[in-house]
Amino acid sequence: MDIISSSMMKKTLNYAKDTLGISRAVLLESAGRGAFEALKGEIYNSYSIICSTNDIGIIGLILAKYLTTNDKFVYINVIGDIDNASVDFKANLNTIKKLGVNVRLFKNSTVDLDILKAQIQRVDATIDAIYGFDLKYEIDDFIKRVIDTLNLFKKKIISIDVPSGLESDNGFELGKCVVADKTITFHKNKNGLINRSDLSGKVDVVTLGLPLEIE
């Protein structure tokens, strides 16, 4: 099984952009489409997706686009400052809104968490698209409460890249961690996912068309 460290994953992504000329937008689109393909065999018809405004959140939005255009019902919950989000994030969020997806912007409040609880109980599965392989710091208190909310119910949880709160190299919990039934990770598997299968669940690796090794 091929495994990649977080530092080498960063080098590979930079190599793809700087040397191969594969744009960030193309890589993210490939990841979102690949995540959709990894879910095609599942029986879920409705999803609650929790996104941050980083690249993992963008992948969550792209995944939502493919789910919606394939007759799945999707809620989007965005955590973070939209005003300071990247151009790519704003463009994908705009696409989602044009498709008529229900989008909620979290304000770090108890009301948001109560709405999320009710929402999760209405859907078949929840998608965690908050943090990815490069998380190295303890998550903040509100995100911990969001993760507690996700873990509270016996609904299926699918994490994008790694379960949010998991350090991808060693499997340490950075304050609090999503307990996923399935993790869709990219390019190669991660040590942290293997070490903490109790948190990552079944791991599917989505290739992005990148070289397996770089010089």
Image: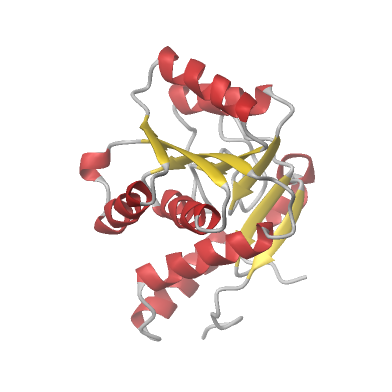
- Residue 165 on image: x %, y %: 57, 38
- Residue 208 on image: x %, y %: 55, 74
Residue at x 78%, y 70% (from the top left corner): 1
- The image shows a total of numbered marks equal to 0
Place residue 150 in its image quadrant: top right
Residue at x 67%, y 39% (from the top left corner): 157
Place residue 110 in its image quadrant: top left
Q: Is residue 25 left or right of residue 75?
A: left
Residue at x 50%, y 58% (from the top left corner): 69
**Residue 189 visible in this rendered orientation of the protein:** no
- Residue 28 on image: x %, y %: 44, 65
Nearer to the camera, 26 or 192? 26
The image shows residue 45, relative to residue 88, as above or below, that is above
Residue at x 45%, y 67% (from the top left corner): 29
Q: Is residue 22 left or right of residue 116?
A: left
- Residue 179 on image: x %, y %: 69, 35
In this picture the colour scheme is secondary structure
The image shows residue 179, relative to residue 212, as above or below, that is above
Nearer to the camera, 141 or 151? 151
The image shows residue 20, relative to residue 97, as above or below, that is below
Nearer to the camera, 61 or 168? 61
**Residue 156 visible in this rendered orientation of the protein:** yes
Q: Is residue 24 left or right of residue 90?
A: right
